[in-house]
Amino acid sequence: MTDTRAEENRRQVLLWRLLARVFDTEEQPGLEAASVAVVDALGLPPALLDPSVSVDTLVQRFPELAAEFRDLMVPGDDEQPRDRARTAALASKLLLNLFATGTGDVTATRLAAWQQDAGWFEQALGCEPGGLRAQPGQNGLGGLLAGLEGDLVKRMRLREVLADPALSRQLTPSMSLIEQLLLDKDNLSGVALANAKALIRRYVDEVAQVLRTQVQQTSAGTIDRSVPPKRVFRNLDIERTIWKNLTNWSPEDERLYVDRLFYRHTAKRTVPARMIVVVDQSGSMVDAMVNCTILASIFAGLPKVDVHLIAYDTRALDLTPWVHDPFEVLLRTRLGGGTDGMVAMSLARPKIMDPRNTALVWISDFYDNQAVQTEFESLHRSGVKLIPVGSVNSSGHQSVDPWFKQKLKDLGTPVISGHIRKLVFELKNFLN
């Protein structure tokens, strides 16, 4: 009982210190002294209590701690209970480094250290580094981490960092950083612009690799049963042939007499599926713009899929010539400004040649001209597969205009929101 009470007392000291340091920049001498004594009693290094020491640095100095940080916050085995005080000490280190970000300017080194600490925090929860921040639509904590990262990026003197090759190399691409680069790219030149482009390219390639895995080997066309199967041996459906001829079984001869052969259909649809992706490029839709231009390029690389890309605010821009290169698309966008979906619709409508073989993916927060809804209804009646998308971003928080949301739901085409995997699923269904 005494050991249990001592463990709980140590845990309480560390948790009170954590709360004090997060909500008050002034040190509490009594709590600090008590925490040093607790850490020493637990056999942990004093650097664990120093907020200026990153978790990554701590693990480099004391490699044995790496295994303890991994899965630290994942529920443990009841047969081998953890020391709650020791767990509290390590968890406090992660939480303090992650959430006590202070105020004022942020250096590239500080941002890089925070991103490394965020990676260790994600590992403590049983995820891969970057896993939570890459799946914000499914986990509120991912959105919180992305928000903290975004705040740090905004507090950086980004132009000065980009102008220094040594500092820019310390930057790890993230959605928050890419957003700032895209918003400020017209104000950059020379070395700063070159470094910005390199970061954007690196991020695009990383996201493309993830999305390409999600898309996997999407079918480029469905079986066309209006075309008779080719009667060759490789197409012979043996199981169906046997099943259909079972009435011809002769018990006396112990033989199955086949009077009809069955073949598999293998002809694929030859008319290319047309996918028109329309993306709102106003300031509130940066994440969707990045993710969906990359996704459009992946689908454009599939056989028999004809992808067109349109970006709009109060003006519309046909980006189809660059749809295979999302990096070039992003460099041609001008984020910010108002929203008028009718200008985008004027570019999209002429591209619809075969409505029943066309998907219109409309990505927006739908704070837009309500006349667009009439166009949506008309296209839906004509047979176009309408896929409205509201939130495929990294913040996890995206409002959609309630008027449009209800109207589109009534139309039978509810707005997709959350993780981009939902959009991938819808597009694969269309192609299949």
Image: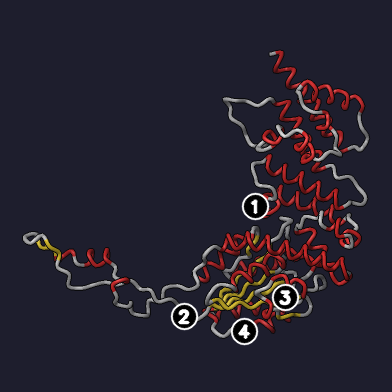
Foreground mark, 2 or 3, reads 2
* First reached walking from the N terminus: tag 1 or tag 3: 1
Label 3 residue SS: strand
Query: Which residue corresponds to the image point at 73% horizontal and 17% vertical from the top-left?
Result: 5
Q: CA distance from mark 1 to mark 3?
A: 27 Å
* First reached walking from the N terminus: tag 4 or tag 1: 1
* Residue type for callout 2: Thr
Rendering coords of residue 174 (x, y %): 75, 57
Residue at the farthest left position: 252
Write down the residue under mark 4: 351
Query: Which residue corresponds to the image point at 82% horizontal and 64% vertical from the top-left?
Result: 195
Res 270 label: 2
Query: Which residue corresponds to the image point at 93% horizontal and 50% vertical from the top-left?
Result: 104
Label 2 crowd (10 A; few <14 / some 14-19 / many >=20)? few
Label 1 residue SS: helix
Whether the residues at callouts 1 and 3 have beta carbons within 8 Å, the answer is no
Image quadrant where residue 153 sits: bottom right
* First reached walking from the N terminus: tag 4 or tag 3: 3
Write down the residue under mark 3: 311
Whether the residues at callouts 4 and 1 have beta carbons within 8 Å, the answer is no
Query: Which residue corresponds to the image point at 27% horizontal and 63% vertical from the top-left?
Result: 239
